[in-house]
Image (spheres, rainbow, N blue to C red):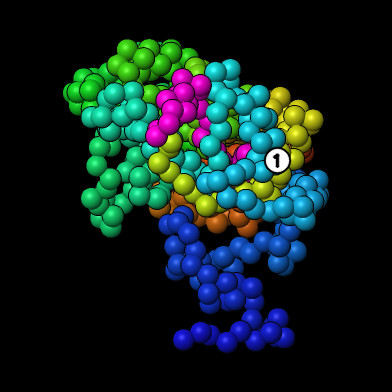
């Protein structure tokens, strides 16, 4: 039965009521009991740069750029106009039998800005689809190369690669309780952590031990059964730990030694987020790279897998076509929006701005950390910063993601006008266009919220 929504009475029916009547909210970051509290579900109406405005006219700093999506900022008319122009000319052609000029232009652009050696572009609609596609490409490629048993994929603990069937099997937080058994053939190895190390307090030793775990896992599984290794070059979901270059060069060597394809999942890190166009630019060139989010800054759902010529070549032979089809891959309006978005990133030099403003934001957070016992660590690169909260700096005791302290801190920051996400780590990934005074305001909000929260939870701190 549907609930009637009065059309005229804004006083009786709020946007929140209307949302709760029919929307099925995503994710467990906002549980239904919280969302249904008065004011518990923010409803936004407009945005400008790094600022969001809700239906009551209140402004917020978009501290996480949506979900590490919005790079060029909200309200970019130029992208809207590019989309309108493309939609009026041609919105859709089927990727199964043809293509369109917008997709060709975007593929050329992506081939030009991804690391040298990546140049073949497969379009899809979101990060999970990109991961599914990359894994299918890897598996089919192994068969085409004469290794029909190479079907396993190794991922990392703490990683996030999406929530559709195949991607979920590679995502560390996938719910065993509800969705197992997962797609077979996925195993996981430790991920570098310089704050709570797996192996060593020395960052290089920690990273080398984590990299060697890949070789051990390949050997344990049997190299003749492993298709690929997938990892985010820097993992936001795993707490924004920054691996050393040695980690990635060692991973690259191990993959090459054992004929295992390296898939870098740049769904979050791509398009300037980490201070370079792609995080891979700071490390090594993968065989396959996935991208989404910042590809369009969220103006349209669009994603891609970019591959090396060596990966692509076997698919060019008669009878070897990729056994995969996504109806919306290469949608023309999406391609036009992504192109306009990348043009803004380049013209406004947002990659350099991410590096500079990220260093500034990190520095300001380190300053306030001096006054807050509960800030255990500030880390990150570019505008991808994590602030880890602890009960005690010495022992590094965690609060726990859903703890009263973390929930209260989230509530306070939001009341003060900052939208972000806090697990044990506060995730800060604002639009790359964020201004210095907005960064200052963001840090002031964290400072003020933390001061209040620390006084409310004083008995549990220390
Ligand atoms: N890969 C990474 C690294 C991600 O962070 C995400 C989403 O946050 C995904 C894949 C899945 O993307 P989507 O939610 O667009 O399916």
For the residue pair 180 and 153, the one nearer the viewer reads as: 153
For the residue pair 49 and 101, the one nearer the viewer reads as: 101
Q: Residues within 10 Å of mark 1 (few under 14, many from 20)?
A: some
Please give the name of the residue rendered at 40% of the width and 33% of the height, measured from the top-left corner. Answer: 320
Q: Is residue 9 above or below residue 178?
A: below
Q: Does the magenta stretch include residue 304?
A: yes
Q: Note whether residue 206 is visible.
A: no
Please give the name of the residue rendered at 65% of the width and 40% of the height, measured from the top-left corner. Answer: 103
Figure disc tally: 1
Q: Name the residue under label 1.
A: 101
- Which residues make up the magenta segment? 292-320
The kind of secondary structure element at disc 1 is: helix
For the residue pair 424 and 408, the one nearer the viewer reads as: 424
Q: Is residue 461 above or below residue 188?
A: below
Locate residue 13: give its quadrant: bottom right
Coordinates of residue 150 in the picture (x, y in percent): 27, 28
Q: Note whether residue 251 is visible.
A: yes
Placement of the C terminus among the 4 image quadrants: top left
């Amino acid at each position: 039965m549907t609930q009637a929504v009065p059309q005229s009475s804004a006083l009786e029916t709020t946007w929140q009521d209307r949302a709760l009547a029919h929307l099925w909210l995503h994710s467990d970051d906002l549980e239904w009991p919280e969302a249904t509290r008065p004011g518990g579900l923010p409803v936004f109406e407009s945005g400008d740069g790094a600022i969001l405005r809700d239906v009551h006219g209140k402004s917020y700093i978009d501290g996480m750029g949506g979900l590490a999506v919005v790079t060029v900022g909200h309200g970019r008319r130029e992208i809207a106009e590019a989309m309108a122009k493309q939609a009026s000319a041609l919105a859709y052609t089927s990727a199964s039998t043809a293509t369109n000029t917008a997709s060709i232009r975007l593929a050329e652009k992506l081939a030009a800005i991804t690391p040298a050696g990546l140049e073949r572009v497969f379009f899809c609609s979101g990060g999970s689809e990109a991961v599914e596609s990359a894994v299918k490409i890897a598996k089919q490629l192994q068969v085409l190369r004469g290794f029909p048993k190479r079907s396993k994929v190794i991922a990392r603990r703490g990683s996030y690669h999406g929530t559709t069937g195949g991607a979920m099997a590679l995502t560390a937080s996938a719910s065993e309780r509800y969705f197992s058994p997962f797609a077979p053939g996925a195993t996981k190895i430790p991920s570098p952590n310089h704050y709570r190390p797996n192996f060593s307090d020395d960052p290089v030793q920690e990273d080398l031990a984590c990299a060697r775990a890949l070789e051990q896992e390949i050997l344990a599984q049997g190299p003749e059964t492993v298709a690929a290794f997938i990892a985010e070059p820097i993992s936001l979901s795993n707490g924004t730990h920054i691996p050393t270059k040695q980690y990635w060069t060692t991973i690259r060597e191990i993959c090459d030694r054992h004929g295992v394809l390296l898939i870098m999942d740049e769904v979050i890190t791509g398009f300037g987020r980490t201070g370079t166009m792609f995080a891979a630019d700071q490390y090594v060139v993968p065989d396959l790279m996935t991208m989404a989010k910042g590809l369009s800054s969220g103006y349209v759902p669009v994603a891609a897998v970019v591959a090396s010529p060596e990966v692509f070549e076997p698919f060019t032979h008669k009878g070897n076509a990729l056994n995969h089809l996504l109806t919306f891959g290469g949608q023309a309006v999406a391609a036009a929006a992504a192109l306009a978005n990348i043009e803004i990133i380049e013209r406004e030099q947002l990659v350099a701005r991410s590096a500079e403003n990220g260093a500034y934001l990190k520095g300001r957070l380190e300053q306030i950390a001096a006054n807050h016992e509960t800030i255990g660590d500030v880390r990150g690169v570019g505008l991808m910063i994590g602030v880890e909260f602890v009960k005690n700096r010495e022992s590094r005791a965690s609060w726990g993601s859903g703890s009263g302290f973390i929930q209260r801190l989230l509530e306070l920051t939001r009341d003060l006008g900052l939208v972000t996400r806090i697990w044990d780590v506060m995730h800060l990934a604002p639009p790359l266009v964020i201004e210095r005074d907005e960064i200052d305001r963001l840090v002031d909000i964290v400072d003020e919220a933390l001061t209040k929260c620390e006084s409310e939870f004083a008995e549990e701190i220390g």
